[in-house]
Image: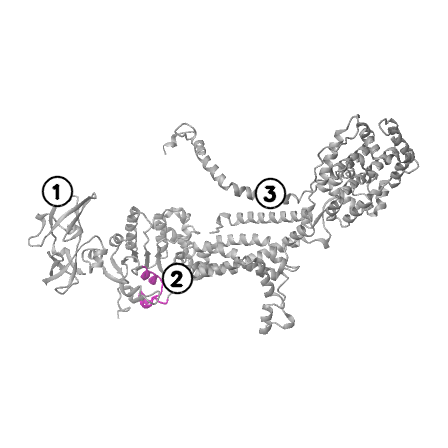
Amino acid sequence: MADASNTDAFVEFERVQKSYDGETLVVKDLNLTMPKGEFLTMLGPSGSGKTTCLMMLAGFETATHGDIRLGGVSINNIPPHKRGIGMVFQNYALFPHMTIAENLSFPLEVRGMGKSTREEKVKRALDMVEMGSFGGRRPAQLSGGQQQRVALARALVFEPELVLMDEPLGALDKQLREKMQFEITHLAHQLGITTVYVTHDQTEALTMSDRVAVFDDGRIQQLAPPDQLYEEPANSFVAQFIGENNTLEGVIKEISDGRALVQLDGGELIDAMPINVSEVGQRTRVSIRPERVEYNKDRLQEGVHTLKAEVLEFIYMGDIFRTRLKVAGNDEFIIKTRNAPDQVRLQPGQQIEIGWLPEDCRALDA
Amino acid sequence: MSDTTQTGPVLAADGTPLKRSLARALRMQKMRALMLIAPLLVFILLTFILPIADMLFRSVENRIVSDTLSETVVTLKDWDALGDEAPGEAVYESLYYDLFVAAEAKEHTKLGTRLNYEETGISSLFRGSGRKVDDVGEDHVKAIERANDGALKDEALWFEIMTGGSSAEGNTGLLDAQRAKLSQLTGDSFAGDIGFVPGAEISALFPRMATAYTDFALFTAIAEEDVVAEEDPWETVFVAFATAVQSAGGAEKLASYTGPGAAELTAAAEALAELEPISFKAAFLDMDEDWGDLGNWRTIQTYSPNYTSGYFLNSIDMQKGPEGAEPRPENQQIYITLFQRTLVMSLVITGSCILLGYPVAWILANLPTRSANILMILVLLPFWTSLLVRTSAWKVMLQQQGVINDVLVWLGLVDDAARLVMINNQFGTIVAMTHILLPFMILPMYSVMQTINPSYLRAAKSLGATNWTAFWRVYFPQSVPGIGAGSILVFILAIGYYITPEIVGGTKGVFISNRIAYHISSSLNWGLAAALGSILLAVVLLLYWAYDKIVGIDNVKLG
């Protein structure tokens, strides 16, 4: 197997399984390899096993089967406090009875560092998150965003090589969350630390990560950089879960030259990229991103199949227009268009013809 | 923000200060809230605060001496308690009249009991003297009665003499004064028409006699519901007359008397001339030689004021002497030891409750809800069992022929001849009370621990703390409010506990509360019980204050 000889591998999960009750597996056969310095996000709906994976890595849960390695060394039997992994908790878990400085000093104290070293490191860590003047306060006296920064500083102050974050931005409002997303990624890359970040917010995952592992049903459905994940979802779960997506169902009519001809259930024919379909006659779910649908005939390529559509609703959203259509029996078909000066505003009841590039349309498992 | 430039109070829209219009708006709400709690407030006031205040007041109240011996305490005031002379004739004279009335009202035994708390033997002195006080001046009384062929045996004549005749001027002031005195003495009302008003002339000439007859008249008419003119006057009236005419200037006074019965009284005075004047001192010493005992008189003088610190001094093993507070004799000192024992044992009980309760509370707080609920029932089960049953169960368990000893003997750990003494001592009290008070420690700890998020411990461990460090530095400080709340609860309950020490405490394991109960129900020394209770209350409040200063009462959470 790929053991310590793989120098790139810093964090490794090898055939890891986890069961709480001995009857069902929460994590099924997880294999994951992370190089040093990577920012990896575990994304998935609740109950998909992502937090369990994080807790196994931190040492608060033990793997039922398989091996977890850190820097080539198996950590299955190392207690959490010896793993040297920084962790940021969902509720920050700042010790309420200690001041901010004492909170930061805690990991240094238990490591037996001298007072002057501790003070210097605490000051540096607080300055790093721009909280230098808050050392004397108690956690309850800080706002959510400030507590978040302190929690981050505390996880970093003892200079761990790996930092785990468990939905750390969940409790913040949207604006602050976006700001913190940027700051966290910036800090992680600047310090060169390896980060495992757990979230159920796909925007967060896409904007922050080097790679995203999409979890569902105890398995990694796709592990890919954000752009690839969005544009080339490997299966229909990922396509559905990441971003907005239009789905049409049908049967494969023909596969040739990397193109598939799909006959929709209403009889219409469309072109698509075959992703995880291989046989003619197989049922398929065709996925198209709303922003890749074109209804301006001039912009459509010659020779592609088009579909008739009826405009049901037009929603003005400022920077974009969002239009709901009825296409091939599906009345939840969404298209998004940029609010440009020459853009046509569709009216409900209008009959139009829509089409797309075959590369943007992916035929996935049904 | 725009208000920063404005000076003076903020105004409401109608120009009144904002504070006032806010107060007006809230007043209605406050009134409604007050109405809602009013029934409870009244209930607590009537059933809790007033009785306690009354009880605490008894710890300093001492009216019984001045009420019963109203004249004696005045004449005794000038007596030099530190000298080696018994009080003079005047004091014994006052005592005679006071004691006579008290004996008629049967109040003298109560006073005896009260003073007996301070000086053993006074109770029997008063009881015996109350019986014999009628005999003082016996010869003089007989002489007066025999004179004039027994004219002064006539109740109606006495009535006429004392009123001064139907048209004479009355001394209502004296009547009202004696009414007030008697109602203070007996606690009953002496209001109402008695068909008698002392005559002004007789009360000016023979004040003592008029007073004595007025007491008699009031007592006869109101307490005994008889007609004054039809009853024999008390001996005090005769004695007062005899004393008056035999004293210096007495003959002239009698000569100047012109009212009814002047001739009979003059004849009686002549009959008395053969007799020596009455010596009250000799009469009392004759009754009981303890009336010459300086200690008794000192006690009466010391406890003459209406309010006394005596009960409180007694509660701290001191006593009130003529020179002020002084320590009680060594063999009578008990309360300081009891207070110390109560405090120390309560602390030990609180400590053992913390040690036993903390792990239980921790397990309760960290178990899944289902299992925690089952365990919680086990914790609460003792609450549903009678306190008496639980304490008695310990008696069965701990006694020398009890379950624990039997098991130890059977195991061979303890020799049959040397069974452990685990009951009727401090050990028994501590064990039983720790068991009984444990839930009061566990519940507040549990509710505080429940609020401690488990992620704190995880965070501490992820930061590199060992299990112990994580517990000690992170978990324990956050659970301290629960320990504080439980400790206050257990300690305050323990310090006033009564039933359990009474049953399993023996003599070495009893608390101050057992002594209070003894004084309330057996010795009936309520003043001392109240003083002991007040001290206990003060100690609890003091400890509460100290706790607030040290830990801060805001840090106490009951849930």
Residue A342: mark: 1
In whole angstroms, how far apart are the C-alphas of marks 2 and 1?
61 Å
Mark 3 belongs to chain: B
Place of residue B361 in the rendered image (x, y in percent of width and height, measured from the top left): 47, 58
Residue sitting at 84 percent across and 27 percent down? B259
From the image, which quarter does the N terminus of chain A lie in?
A: bottom left
Whether B96 is drawn above or below A106: the answer is above
Label 2 sits on what residue type? His
Extent of the magenta region: A51-77
Quarter of the image holding residue B49? top right
Mark 1 belongs to chain: A
Place of residue A268 in the rendered image (x, y in percent of width and height, measured from the top left): 10, 56
Q: Which residue is mark 2?
A: A81
Label 1 sits on what residue type? Asp
From the image, which quarter does the C terminus of chain A lie in?
A: bottom left
Residue sitting at 78 percent across and 46 percent down? B126
Q: Is residue A5 visible?
A: yes
Frontmost of labels 2 and 1 is: 1
Q: Are marks 3 and 1 on the same chain?
A: no
